[in-house]
Image (tube, rainbow, N blue to C red):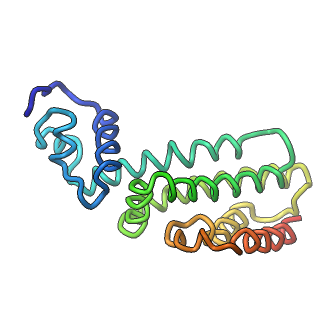
Amino acid sequence: MTKNELPLSKDEILDAAEQVLRRYGPDKTSVVDIAKVLQVSHGTLYRHFESKAALREAVTSRWLHTSIAVPLEAIASGTGGSAVGRLRLWLDTLIQTKRKFAAEDAEMFAMYANVTVIEVEMISTHMYRLIKQLEQIIEAGMASKELKQGDSESLARAIFLATSRFHHPSHAGEWAMGSLGEDFESVWQLLLGGLT
């Protein structure tokens, strides 16, 4: 079973773990399953990650960063178009990305939803990163006088929280509702009225 005892990088382990988690789901995946894919002993994995929970957290953290935070950062740091347009694009992208993953990458989304309840610190770091992106857009809008002056950090946090029904995994069961688009538009208009 352990034909490959060469040193493994964390990325190699995370790649294999993500593959196995997608195949079996977060509840049925064991460290032994991941070790089999890598052709190493499960003890080798424990040298990198102290537990199955730590490995799942690392997989989820990387997935959130590469699949959600990085694409949104490109919008937040963009310089073209209006701040309002970028803000709306950022929110639309966040919402559509989460819905897409809930529908098309169900195992990873389920793990992410589970981790949001258990790993508060990791999720707080992820939320902080996203709120900072919103803050960046708001500050650009204030600098161009497109948005009213105010506390950009508080505004960014308020926007993130006000729209959470549309992107937080605990609301995923509501995302198929027919009125969700209209509901978001109502929230968006309210936010826009306060910002401009």
Residue at 39% from the left image edge and 55% from the top image edge: 107
Question: How many numbered discs, if any?
Answer: 0
Residue at 57% from the left image edge and 53% from the top image edge: 129
Point out the image quarter for the C terminus: bottom right
Residue at 72% from the left image edge and 50% from the top image edge: 136
> In the image, is 43 to the left or to the right of 53?
left
Q: Quadrant of residue 48?
A: top left
Q: Give the image location of residue 187, x and y in percent.
A: 76, 73
Point out the image quarter for the N terminus: top left
Q: Give the image location of residue 116, x and y in percent.
A: 43, 65
Q: Give the image location of residue 11, x and y in percent.
A: 34, 35
- Seen as rendered, the residue at the extreme left is 1
Q: Quadrant of residue 134?
A: bottom right
Image position of 77 with respect to 182: above or below: above
Residue at 77% from the left image edge and 56% from the top image edge: 88
Image position of 4 with respect to 190: above or below: above
Report the front residue among 124 and 19.
19
Report the front residue among 39 and 119.
39
Report the front residue among 76 and 187.
187
Report the front residue among 114 and 87.
114
Image position of 42 with respect to 195: above or below: above
Image position of 163 with respect to 35: above or below: below
> In the image, is 73 to the left or to the right of 150?
left
Q: Quadrant of residue 157?
A: bottom right
